[in-house]
């Protein structure tokens, strides 16, 4: 797989393992921007089209089966769900965008909240933008990339469901998404290929996310 960025060090991977082995709890659900919890500690938000696997990857990262509610029915996550990682970092499971079946009013409502959050959250350390490896890029993904660029929110592109791709198809998909990353100033150039079912890329993603966590108490 093409790598332009050096892989994480053993130490960084270990930090990730440690962070995600600690306590993890759901602590807040916000349906509107007015309801957001105070911006107290760094947040990493998971964004992506409906059904891309946002809730599943949070479960895979934390090693909990049903911390975030995942479903084969698109449009499962209907609010911004906040998870606390040992008081060191928050993870935010977002509703999906590009969900064709939701009513227009509901879609506009979600999108307004989502975009307002992405644009205006002062403690948002990084957005993890998930792209379904089987589906590839859609117009709505490109719109979100443009929005993140404009808001200068750095984002990490992650391919999901890579267990369902042949090695050749995966290489092609990574190339396609790398090209997208290159064309956006706010995109991190390295793409992480993942699977929540086989745990491909999950340890690496833990290490990436741990960079934004507060130091653990009792350690420098
Ligand atoms: N094969 C495969 N399926 C996956 C993977 N991750 C998630 N899925 C499936 O994809 C479907 C959607 O997963 P969710 O995690 O609920 O997706 P989401 O992005 O949270 O969806 P919304 O909340 O509706 O926006 C479920 O049927 C999952 O089982 C994966 O790594 N591999
Ligand atoms: Mg979800």
Image (cartoon, rainbow, N blue to C red):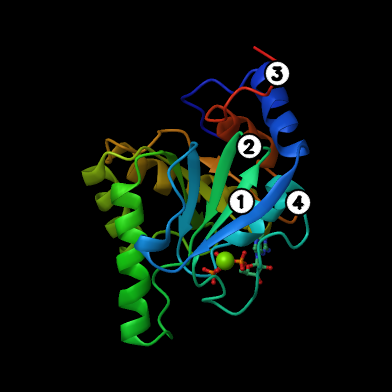
Asked if residue 138 can be seen in this view, the reply is no
State the separation of the CA atoms marked 2 and 3. Answer: 24 Å
Camera-near label (2 vs 1) is: 2
Relative to 185, residue 38 above or below: below
Q: Which residue is mark 2?
A: 87
Residue 10: image tag: 3
In the image, residue 98 lies at what x, y percent?
39, 72
Q: Which residue is mark 4?
A: 198
Say whether disc 2 or disc 3 marks the residue closer to the N-terminus.
3
Q: Residues within 10 Å of mark 3 (few under 14, many from 20)?
A: few
Answer yes or no: disc 4 within 8 Å of ligand 1. yes
State the separation of the CA atoms marked 2 and 1. Answer: 10 Å
Residue 183 horizontal side relative to residue 67, left or right: left
State the separation of the CA atoms marked 2 and 4. Answer: 28 Å
Say whether disc 1 or disc 4 marks the residue closer to the N-terminus.
1
Answer yes or no: disc 3 within 8 Å of ligand 1. no
- Circle 2: element type: loop
Contact between marks 2 and 3 (CB within 8 A): the answer is no
Asked if residue 188 can be seen in this view, the reply is yes
Say whether disc 2 or disc 4 marks the residue closer to the N-terminus.
2
Say whether disc 3 or disc 4 marks the residue closer to the N-terminus.
3
Camera-near label (2 vs 4) is: 2
- Circle 3: element type: helix
The one of 181 and 85 positioned closer to us in this rendering: 85
State the separation of the CA atoms marked 3 and 1. Answer: 26 Å
Q: Residue at x 21, y 45 (%)?
A: 150
Considering every residue shown, the one lying at the far left of the view is: 150
Q: Residues within 10 Å of mark 2 (few under 14, many from 20)?
A: some
Q: Which residue is mark 1?
A: 83
- Quadrant for ligand 2? bottom right
């Amino acid at each position: 797989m093409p790598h332009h960025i050096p892989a994480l060090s053993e130490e960084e991977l270990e930090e990730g393992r440690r962070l995600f082995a600690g306590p993890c709890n759901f602590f807040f659900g916000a349906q509107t921007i007015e309801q957001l919890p105070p911006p107290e500690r760094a947040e990493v938000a998971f964004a992506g089209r409906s059904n891309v696997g946002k809730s599943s990857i949070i479960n895979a990262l934390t090693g909990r089966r049903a911390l975030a509610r995942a479903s084969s029915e698109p449009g499962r996550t209907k609010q911004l769900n906040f998870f606390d990682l040992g008081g060191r970092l928050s993870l935010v499971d977002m509703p999906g965008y590009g969900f064709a079946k939701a009513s227009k009013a509901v879609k506009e409502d979600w999108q307004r909240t989502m975009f307002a959050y992405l644009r205006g959250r002062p403690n948002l350390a990084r957005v993890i933008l998930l792209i379904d490896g089987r589906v590839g890029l859609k117009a709505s993904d490109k719109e979100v990339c443009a929005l993140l660029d404009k808001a200068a929110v750095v984002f990490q592109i992650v391919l999901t469901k890579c267990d369902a791709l042949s090695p050749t198809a995966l290489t092609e998909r990574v190339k396609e998404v790398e090209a997208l990353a290159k064309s956006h100033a706010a995109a991190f150039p390295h793409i992480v290929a993942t699977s929540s079912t086989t745990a491909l890329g999950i340890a690496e993603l833990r290490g990436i996310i741990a960079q934004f966590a507060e130091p653990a108490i009792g350690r420098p």
